[in-house]
Image (cartoon, helix red, strand yellow):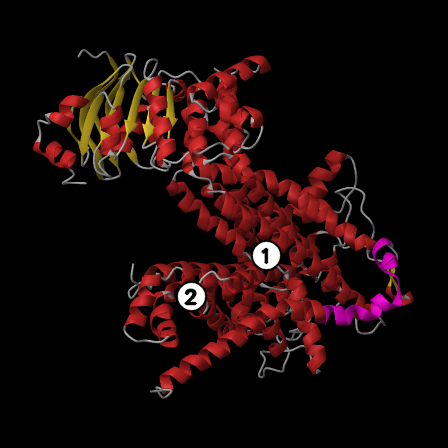
Amino acid sequence: MKVPMSARRVKDIMASKIMLVLTLAAVALIFFMVAGLYFKSRPILASQPLSELFFSSRWRPFRGEFGFLSFIMGTVWVTGVAVLIAVPLCLLTSIYLSEYANSKVREWVKPLIDILAGIPSVVFGVWGMLVVVPFIKDVVAPFAGVFSTGYSILAGGIVLAIMIFPVIIHVSLEIFRAVPQEVREASLAVGATRWQTIKHVVMRKALPGVAAAVVLGISRAFGETMAVLMVVGNVAKIPHSVLDPAYPLPALIANNYGEMMSIPLYDSALMLAALILLLVVLLFNALSKMILIRVQRSIR
Amino acid sequence: MERRNIEEKIFKGLMLLSTMVILSSLVLILLTVLVKGLPYLSLAMVTQVPQGGYYLGKGGGILNAIVGSLYLAGGATFLAILLSLPVALYLNVYSKSDSKFVSACRFTFDVLCGVPSIVYGAFGFTIMIFFGMRASLLGGIIAIALLIMPMMIRSMDEVIRLVPRELMDASYALGANRWETALKVVVRQSLPGILTSILIAFGRGIGDAAAVIFTAGFTDAIPTSLLRPVATLPLAIFFQLGVPIPEVQGRAYASALILTIMILIISLAARLLSKKLTRHVVK
Amino acid sequence: MDYQTHISVQNLNVHYGNQQVLKNITLNIPDRKITAIIGPSGCGKTTLLKSFNRLIDSVEGVKISGRVLVDDENILDPKTEVTHIRKKMGLLLQKPYPLPMSIYDNVAYGPRIHGIKNKKRLDEIVERFLKKASLWDEVKERINQPASMLSVGQQQRLCLARGLAVEPEIILGDEPTSALDPQSSQRIEQTFVELKQDYTIVIVTHILRQARRMADYVVFLYLGELIEHGPAWDIFNHPKQALTREYIKGLIS
C-alpha cells in the first residue's frame, strides 16, 4: 500500500529542495562575480590590447590611456614588504605557541590574536597615519638619508603586515599542532634538543602547510584596501624603493569611484582592476586551500 | 655549553621576542586610538547628527554614521543568515557527510572568504547598475551581505559539523525526518556556535569600508528608507581625516575610538555568549 | 637466577593534574634482559615507560616525585640534562613514526644530532644498524628513498635502527608490535631476543602471549599500582597475588 504523503513529508522535501537551491546559488556567487566584473570590463579590454593595459605605466584617463603597470607594481611592492615583515614574526610566534608555550599561555594569546583580526581596516589606517607615517618621516627616512613624507610603501607594508598576522598565525599554528606528538618524541628520544627537533622534523613536516599559510597571507594583503590607501601615498608611479609612495590597485578602485562615471571607459578600467584582484586572489586562495587539504591528509 | 644549546637559547629568545612584538602591536593600536580619541569624545558625538559646517569644525556628532552602520550591518547580517543557515544545514543534514559535493561547496566558500571587500563592493556596484539602483542603504546591505555570507556559512558549517552523529540518529530513530531533526535538534544543539558566527559576521559588517564606498553612499541624515543613501562609521572616519582642520581630525580619532569600542563589545559578547548559552547542549 | 639492576625505580609517583597515574612504584629492572610491563589499558604502563626517558616532561600539568636511577644517576633530577639520558635509550612507539626524510637520514639523524658529520662513518653506522634491525637486505638498494615508502613492518624496524644508531644501552618499546601484522611482529620479537645480549630491553605490552614468549622479567601494573613483579616464569606459573592470577587467566582486561 502506498503511504499518502503527509504534510510533514512534504515539508521535508520542500525544505530540501529550497536549501539545495540556496546552496547552489551561494556556490554560484563566485561565477557571478567573475562574469559580472568581466562583463563590465569588456569595453576597456576591447579598446586596447592587453599588453598596453598591463605593461604600460601611462595612466591618463582623460586621454583614454589606461596603463595599469604602476598600480600592479605598487600592489606587488606593498604586499612584498608586508609578507617579508610578517612571515618571520608569525612563524617564530606560531612555533613558540605550539612547541614551547603551555596551554594556559596559548589560551591567553589566541583571543588576543582574534581581537587583532577583528579590528576594522580603517582603524589600522588611523593608527598607521598617527604612528607609522610620522615614524618613517622623522626616523627612518633621515636615517636612510632621504626625504620622505612618511606616506610610503614601508608604511603600507608595516600596517598590512600587522593585519595579516592573524591569518598566518592561525593557519600555521593549526598545522604545527597537527604534527603528531610521536614524531617529536621519536626525535627527542634519540637525544635531540627541542630546537633540533623543530628544525629537522617539525618544520619539515609542516613546511607545505606553512607555505599555504603564507600564500593565504599574501592573498589577504593583496586585496586590503582602506588601511593601505590611508598610508601609502597614492602616487601613480612605478616605485623604486620602500620609501617611495605607491598606488596599489585596491586604492585605485576606492579612490576614484566618484569621478569614474564622468570619464569614458574609466568605470570599465576600475572594474577591470577589481577583476584582476578577484582572479589573483581566487587563484592564491585555491592554491593555499588545496595545499592545506593535502597536508591534512598526509600529516598524520 | 654545547653549540646546540646556545642555538636553542637564541631561537627561543627570538620566538619570545616575535610573540611580544605581535602582541604589543595590538596593544599599541588600541592605546593610540584611545589616547588620541578620548579627548575629543563627547556626548554630542554619539547623540547628534552633523550640523551645518560640521566638517569645518562646527557642532554636531556622528550619530548618522553610528546608526547607519548598525542599520547596514544589521540588515546585511539578517540577509546573510537567511542564506547561510539553510546552506550550512543542507551541507550537514541533507547531504551525505563528506561527499564530493559537500567538499566542493566547502572549498568554494573557503575561497570566497578570502575575496577582498573592495571586490565585493565593485561587484555590488555592477548589480546596482544592472537594476538601475543608486547608492543606498539597500545597495550597501547587499554588498555587505555578500561579503559576510561565505564566512558565516563556513563558521556555521564548522559548528554544526560538531553535532554528534549519534544525536541526529537518535532523533531519526524517533521517527523525525531530516527537516525536523535539523530544526529541533541540530540548530538547538549548535545554537551558541551559530550565534557566535552571527555576531562575528555582524562585527565584520560594521567595520568594513571598502565594500560600501560604491554602494551605500554617504549622508548627514539618518536614512528613513532602504533606498536612501546611508553613512557608515568607517567612511565617516575616513572623510573626517581628510579635512585639514585639527578639530575635525580629532573627531575622526574619536570616531575611530567609538568604532573600536563597538567592535570590542561585539567580540566580547560573542565570547560570553558561546560560554553562557550552553544549557541545552549535550556534551 | 641472579639479576644485575640497570634501572632502579624508587617511590615513583606521577600525577596528571589531579589524577594520580602511578602510585609509589619501586622496582628494579634487570640488566640485559627483556622486561615486560603488563596490565590492562590505562594502568600507567606507558607512563612508567616514558618516565624512564623523561618524555613525560612534555605532558601538560605533569607532576613527578621519586627517583629513577640509571647507572646510579637520578634521571628525574631537574638538573639532569635530558638529551644525554635519552641518548642512552632507544624508543619504539606503538605505531612506527619515521621522520619525514630518507631511510638513510632516518638512521643518520641521531648520530648527526650528536655531532658525527663524517660521511664515511655515517655510511658505516647506517649499514651496521640497519643490519642489526634486520632491515638492511630489504632496503640497501633504495636507501635514499623516503622512509614513508616502506611497509609498516619495515618502518618499525627502521625506527628500531634509528634508536640503536645513537648506541643506547636500553631499548624501550611501547607496545611496539601492536600496529603490525603477525609476521612483522614476529620479526621484531626475534630481533629483540637477539638484541638482549647487548641491551636492556623494556617493553610495554597488553598481549600476554607476547610477554610469555619474550620476557625474562615481568612487571604487573593495575590502576597505577605495582601489583607484582618478578622473573617471568614465576609470574606466569606461580603468581602470588590474586589480581595477577585473574589477569593472567584473562578474567580482567
* Residue under the point 47% across and 73% down: B86
**Residue A246 visible (yes or no):** no
* Residue under the point 50% across and 37% down: A95
Picture quarter with the C terminus of chain C: top left
State which region is magenta.
A36-55
Numbered badge on residue A123: 1
Does C68 appear in magenta?
A: no
* Residue under the point 83% across and 56% down: A54
Q: Is residue A42 left or right of residue B182?
A: right
* Residue under the point 41% across and 84% down: A10
Numbered badge on residue B167: none
The front one of A13 and A265 is A13
* Image quarter of residue A105: top left
Q: Is residue A21 left or right of residue B236?
A: left
The front one of B12 and A233 is B12
Q: Which residue is mark 2?
A: B194
Does A43 appear in magenta?
A: yes
